[in-house]
Image (cartoon, rainbow, N blue to C red):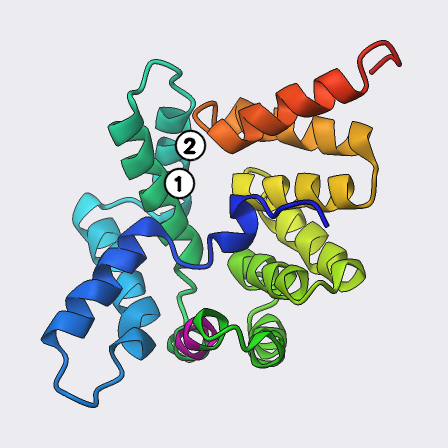
Amino acid sequence: MTPALPWAHMIVPALLVALIFEQVAAAPAGGHAPARAVSAASEQFSAADSRSGLSRAEKLDQLYARLADRTLDEENSEKIIAAIEMAWLESGSETVNFIMDRVLTATRSQNYDLSIKLLTKVTEIAPDYAEGWNQLAVAYYLSENYDHALPPLLRALSLDHRHFKAIEGYGVLMREMNNKRAALSAFRKVLAINPHSATAREAEAELSRDIDGQGI
């Protein structure tokens, strides 16, 4: 099995990790701080949107445009990526946020069967929530059920064609299936949206070498 790229490990965005640690520190003994993390992140992003007067789509447009700047240093690109990941997480539904809390806990415990069950419910409740489909694909991938990972991943991309983690996931799956040309195309699309992705850049270079001379 090819080692998983970060797509399969990005269950929790960087800023959400920080929120979890803050909640763990503040929680009373015996509390379950991680179960509030998704809601906290969602509320934080929604509050930021309210202050800026921008819709979620408008804020994402701005963030994607800033991320495309190749002159960004690592610190600033990571901040923008974390903000985008938080925007992906925002569902606009308290019910979905509650279920995603449980998904977070299940996935961190490597209980992928439960994650899949919960995420399937999320996609039923919110079929237009791209991150629900993406995380369902991730859960299937982590459980090594690659055939089932592809359909939800394609659904996520149909809802958000700039979701560079989902595109990266597609590249990972295509490489697992030995479809190197499709994988190469996917990683190049990742770099077009997020030119700061070291993993996509490394994968693109490796795949280019693998098929060099065969025509692309």
Q: Nearer the viewer, residue 71 or 89?
A: 71
Q: Which residues are magenta?
A: 100-105
Q: Are marks 2 and 1 in contact (CB under 8 Å)?
A: yes
Q: Which of the 4 image quarters holds residue 111?
A: bottom right
* Residue 110 x/y as whole percent: 52, 72
- Residue labelled with disc 2: 64
Q: Amino acid at mark 2?
A: Tyr
- Residue labelled with disc 1: 60
Q: Nearer the viewer, residue 158 or 26?
A: 26
* Residue 63 x/y as whole percent: 36, 34
- Decide: few, some or many residues near mark 1? Use Cα within 10 Å; few <14, some 14-19, many ≥20: some
What residue sits 26% from the left and 29% below the top? 76
From where the camera sits, is residue 115 visible?
yes
Q: Which of the 4 image quarters holds residue 34?
A: bottom left
Residue 101 in the magenta stretch? The answer is: yes
Q: Which quadrant is the C terminus positioned in?
A: top right
What residue sits 21% from the left and 57% below the top? 47
Q: Is residue 103 left or right of residue 27?
A: right
Q: Nearer the viewer, residue 191 or 126?
A: 191
